[in-house]
Amino acid sequence: MFTLSKNSCLSTTLLVSLFVLAISLFFTTSPTFPHRLSLLARQFLPIRSISTSPTMTTYAKELRVAELAVQRATLLTKYVFHEKAKGTLSKDDASPVTIGDFGAQALIIQAIRKNFPQDEIVGEEEAATLRENKELSSKIWTLVKEARLSDATAEEELGGPIPSEEDMLSAIDAGNSAGGAKGRVWALDPIDGTKGFLRGGQYAVCLALMVDEDVKVGVLGCPNLPVDDSASLDAHSGENQTDAEGKGVLFGAVQGQGATSRPLGIGALGKSQPIHMKEVSSIADATFCESVEAAHSSHSDQSQIAQKLGITKPSVRMDSQAKYGSIARGAGDLYLRLPVRKDYQEKIWDHAAGDLIVREAGGEVTDAQGKRLDFGKGRTLRNNKGVVAAPRGVHAQVLEAVKSVLGSK
Ligand SMILES: Nc1ncnc2c1ncn2[C@@H]1O[C@H](COP(=O)(O)O)[C@@H](OP(=O)(O)O)[C@H]1O
Ligand SMILES: [Mg+2]
């Protein structure tokens, strides 16, 4: 019979322990530990379970591509915005916003398709009208061709420029996914806040990645917000600001990793810093951000809710998801979207990025009944009505006021 002496038993145990210790030290002290773990996991687990687990995947590449792609798209939107302000592009032919929308969508989808060819994309625009209007299409193509980051490496990371006008149209049309609760789905709003864009106010280029309906990555490019996170809230509304000095911010977030802001540049990404919502110790001191458009969110319900909460400071009106970015960095505290039309369904591209950025900055985002926004129901948030975004500590209090005002209707 095979037996072991007490001594050899002890030395075997010692050897095994030393081996285990060495392996754990190697992995845990290595800067590439999460990456190694993910590679190891990839060999033993099916792909789907890796991409849905926040601990296994850092989404570092997705965030980087999204930030660079949004930054590149804003080169085009900023050009169009300033040409419009100079009067070179007029509002009459509806072209400024159309050119900006289509051009930005093409540039961003090109980068997603190059880097993540299997992913689905829900984009706001489609190219049908451009295929019928050759003149408009070639006008957009002229600008798309020129929109390049000044940093060659960054441009390479995005997969380079779009090769032809036909490729541009095909990229725009690749945003036609129906969305849904399964797999990797990007939500893209090439120019959110169309009305703000035309008015010379705030607008945002918005991109988010959902994996199995959960928002994992969110990016907002806001060319007209102040770079400075501590700038006064008035500077955030940005009506008729045409001077680009000190403006342009890029917000980013990955689920479980916090939210950041960085200057919106023209080449490589600028330095990022963490952002946090402001702590609200007394709700009466809070400030609301609300939509400029009373047709998008009821201004009268908003003022009744403010009254209920004892808030006397006037709300700051701002277009686009710049509202989510602003409260996430403590410029303003609360953002409500109060339904005007009962039949209107909010679009996923109008909320996905902002929802994650606010939650990662210490906030809570629900609908007006307190339900989490449901991004797995296709292109719209058909399971939700309204939006309530607030710092985690006061969200319940704000929601109660919202319910009591909307409930009495
Ligand atoms: N009746 C309505 N209720 C709520 N949102 C609406 C709406 N009609 C349009 N919108 C959305 O409101 C967005 C702008 O939001 P805000 O008012 O916060 O700036 C628009 O995005 P686009 O500008 O991309 O079209 C559009 O999708
Ligand atoms: Mg929008």
Image (cartoon, grey):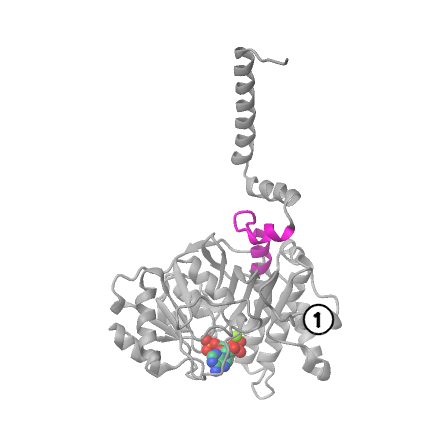
Q: Quadrant of residue 370?
A: bottom left
Label 1 crowd bin: few (<14), some (14–19), many (20+), radius 10 Å: many
Which quadrant, please, contains the C terminus? bottom left
- Count of marks placed on residues: 1
Name the residue at 47% across, 67% down. 373
User: Which one is nearer the viewer's eye here, 392 or 86?
Assistant: 392
Q: Name the amino acid, label 1.
A: Met
Secondary structure category for the residue under label 1? helix
Could you say where residue 339 lies in the image, as x and y percent from the top left?
A: 42, 80
The answer to whether residue 147 is left or right of residue 296 is right
Q: Is residue 310 visible?
A: yes
Judging by the rendered image, the residue that carries numbered circle 1 is: 168
Q: Quadrant of residue 328?
A: bottom left
The answer to whether residue 124 is left or right of residue 231 is right
User: Which one is nearer the viewer's eye here, 361 or 168?
Assistant: 361
Name the residue at 56% across, 39% down. 33
Could you say where residue 379 lies in the image, as x and y percent from the top left?
A: 57, 72
**Magenta stretch: includes residue 191:** no
Could you say where residue 126 lies in the image, as x and y percent from the top left?
A: 65, 76
Q: Quadrant of residue 76?
A: bottom right
Name the residue at 55% across, 51% down. 53
Q: Is residue 201 visible?
A: no
374 relative to 36, above or below:
below
Instruction: Examine the residues drawn in magenta and state their main secondary structure.
Output: helix
User: Which one is nearer the viewer's eye here, 266 or 134?
Assistant: 134
Could you say where residue 408 lies in the image, as x and y percent from the top left?
A: 32, 82
Which quadrant, please, contains the N terminus? top right
263 relative to 292, above or below:
above
User: Which one is nearer the viewer's eye here, 87 or 34?
Assistant: 34
**Magenta stretch: includes residue 50:** yes
Image: magenta residue range: 47-67
